[in-house]
């Protein structure tokens, strides 16, 4: 396989990130009651700086640029977590950050942007509309635009998670990864398949935002007519060619879970393991608990818990 983001870039991202992001724990989920087949481990990116994996990709992107390119400031669009990652990267670089958010981002997240010194602008009802506004502002004012998922440096940053999973749990047979725009699974799958081609990588999307599921079916990037999931961080109407091509090469399949299955998984994580995950953060576990993925007896499954929070879940 010819990976569009290769292992060299992912390893370089790890060196670049250094002490700026956390090596998050991988926890074996032991003593589970009425659990499906397989031995479950959880990669807790919910304990990452800013509360999600997004700090990795955004920080790698910003640190890979010449300082003079970011001096005027950063701009991005986000469903919430990527914006926090860019706000953190801007805080590290000591440059201003402007984040465009759609109306479906909960008000509870706004204060978190402000703690990193970012300016928030509400624009549109979905990520794609906020993204268009962010691009226009970047071009107009000469700001550095940081894409949420369709950027090789962002993908490489997310790929550092794959390195850590295989180092901490080399027995892993299957990795479950939530999909929004596809940056996370593009990076994780590129790392995992480069190091352990036999490990299966399965993506998980909401029934109400099957962006890459439908793109794979069509053989091309498609734009959804509407979004109906409450998991707003997994809800762009359109992905990008970069991510679709990587996913075609590296991901076995994409399964769909309902909002209620994600909600039940988030409750299960909290009640069984004391892990606070937002809807999107629980998507991988939802696929396992609901039986949407085929897991053999004794297989080792790693679910990526990608975002923290339990508002409206427990």
Image (tube, rainbow, N blue to C red):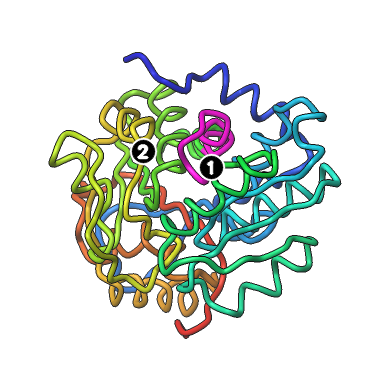
Assign a secondary structure to mark 2. Answer: loop
Chief SS of the magenta region: helix
Q: Which mark is residue 147?
A: 1
Residue at the left extreme of this rendering: 217
Judging depth in this view, the residue of 16 and 282 nearest the camera is 16
The residue under the point 58% across, 79% down is: 107
Residue, disc 2: 240
Judging depth in this view, the residue of 309 and 79 nearest the camera is 79
Q: Reply above or below: 143 against 279.
A: above
| Residues rendered magenta in the picture | 147-161
Q: CA distance from mark 2 to mark 1?
A: 11 Å
In the rendered image, residue 265, in percent from the top left (x then y), is placed at: 37, 71
**Quarter of the figure that contains the N terminus:** top left
The residue under the point 79% across, 41% down is: 72
Assign a secondary structure to mark 1. Answer: loop
Reading the chain from its start, which is encountered first: label 2 or label 1?
Answer: 1
In the rendered image, residue 83, in percent from the top left (x then y), is placed at: 61, 56
In the rendered image, residue 133, in percent from the top left (x then y), is placed at: 52, 54
């Amino acid at each position: 396989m010819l990976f569009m983001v290769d292992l060299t870039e992912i390893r370089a991202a790890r060196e670049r990130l250094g002490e700026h992001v956390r090596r998050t724990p991988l926890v074996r989920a032991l003593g589970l009651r009425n659990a499906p087949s397989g031995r479950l481990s959880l990669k807790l990116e919910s304990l990452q700086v800013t509360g999600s994996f997004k700090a990795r990709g955004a920080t790698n992107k910003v640190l890979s640029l010449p300082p003079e390119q970011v001096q005027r400031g950063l701009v991005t669009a986000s469903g919430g977590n990527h914006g926090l990652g860019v706000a953190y990267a801007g805080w590290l670089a000591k440059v201003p950050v402007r984040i465009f958010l759609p109306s479906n981002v909960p008000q509870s997240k706004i204060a978190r942007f402000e703690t990193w010194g970012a300016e928030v602008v509400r624009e549109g009802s979905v990520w794609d509309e906020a993204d268009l506004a962010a691009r226009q502002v970047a071009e107009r004012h000469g700001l550095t635009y940081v894409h949420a998922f369709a950027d090789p440096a962002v993908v490489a940053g997310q790929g550092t998670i794959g390195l850590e999973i295989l180092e901490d749990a080399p027995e892993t047979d299957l990795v479950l990864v939530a999909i929004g725009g596809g940056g996370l699974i593009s990076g994780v799958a590129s790392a995992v398949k480069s190091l352990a081609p036999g490990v299966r990588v399965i993506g998980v999307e909401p029934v109400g935002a099957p962006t890459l599921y439908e793109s794979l079916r069509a053989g091309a990037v498609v734009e959804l007519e509407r979004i109906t999931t409450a998991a707003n961080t997994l809800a762009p109407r359109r992905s990008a060619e970069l991510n679709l091509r990587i996913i075609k090469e590296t991901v076995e399949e994409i399964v769909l879970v309902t909002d209620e299955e994600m909600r039940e998984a988030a409750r299960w994580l909290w009640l069984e393991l004391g892990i606070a995950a937002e809807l999107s953060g629980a998507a991988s576990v939802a696929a396992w608990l609901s039986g949407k993925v085929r897991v053999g007896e004794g297989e080792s499954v790693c679910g990526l818990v990608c975002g923290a929070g339990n508002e409206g879940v427990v």
